[in-house]
Amino acid sequence: MIYINHLKLTESSGICRSPTIPGLYYSHNDSGNAPTLYAFDELGENLGEYPLNLRPLDCEAISSGMVNSVPTIILCDVGDNNLARLSYKIHVINEVSGTSGPTFSRSINFTYPDGKRRNCESATLLPDGKIILVTKSYPLASGPTQAFTLLSYLSGDSGTVCFAGPLLHAKLGTITDADYKDGVLVLLGVIKTRPAAHFFNIGDWTPFKSVVLDTAPQAEALCLSHDGKKVLMTSETNRTAGARTPLYIKPL
């Protein structure tokens, strides 16, 4: 375990790769904090911070990729612990070359197809612009863990959410994040303080591997490394290190 050298990153709730810069990653805080992206490398070194012109409610995930040749990051305002929200948002951010860094572009508003409210901490951008949402049933039970596909202008659609199916393949625990790379979806499942990365083929949701990660209090965010050979994970609490967020790296 190492630590991320961003003193303002106190509740890391998501982590993603830079779409264009190998070795660079972004994280963000949970609700109640300024909407800022914090850049760092695999040694936890501070590579800059980028405030965004947003007023989100509860950003719980971040994901990235090249969509129509545009380096795209999505900051996912999809948390709803009290099941009180009427709608949810995906904030689209372009990674601009040069000193300006990531820049807010526009927001996507959505509701779930059955009109129900759901708490979600996992949202993953696919290369075709579709977004996979995986719900979280804790702390208020809103049914089993489920997967949805969000279609929007990123995928050439006007904006709908399609039910993808219940995730009943394995005892995954509480799903707190997800990532996608090279046809594989990875879910961060947590049982108490024991996190694991669960690997699925994106085409048919077939699970094919699980990797136990380091024990961590409130494991919250996960992504694969740029070369796909490591899993990076952060914890939402930095109480173990005073003012620095722990970063766990697991070779695959």
Image (tube, rainbow, N blue to C red):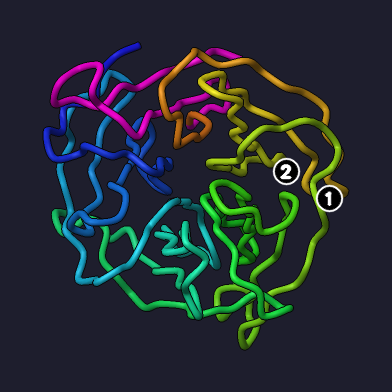
Q: Does the stretch in magenta take in 245?
A: yes
Q: Position of residue 13 (x, y in %)?
A: 38, 43
CA–CA distance in space, label 2 to label 1: 8 Å
The residue carrying mark 2 is 183
Task: Give the magenta range.
Answer: 226-252
Position of 238 compared to 199: left or right? left
Quadrant assignment for the C terminus: top right
User: Going 28% across and 18% down the picture, which residue do you hit?
Assistant: 43
For the residue carrying disc 1, how many other residues have a C-alpha within 10 Å: few (<14), some (14-19), or many (20+)?
few
User: Going 84% across and 42% down the picture, which residue do you hit?
Assistant: 168
Residue 203 numbered mark, or none: 1
- The amino acid beneath tag 1 is Gly
Callout 2 secondary element: loop
Q: For residue 72, say whether it is visible.
A: no
Position of 60 compared to 183: left or right? left
Q: Which of marks 2 and 1 is nearer the N terminus?
A: 2
User: Going 75% across and 51% down the picture, which residue do you hit?
Assistant: 144
Q: Identify the image quadrant of residue 26.
A: top left
Question: Relative to 125, is 27 above or below?
Answer: above
Q: Where is residue 217 in the image (x, y as percent from the top left)?
A: 41, 22
Q: Does the stretch in magenta take in 158?
A: no
User: Going 35% across and 11% down the picture, which residue do you hit?
Assistant: 1
Position of 11 compared to 146: left or right? left
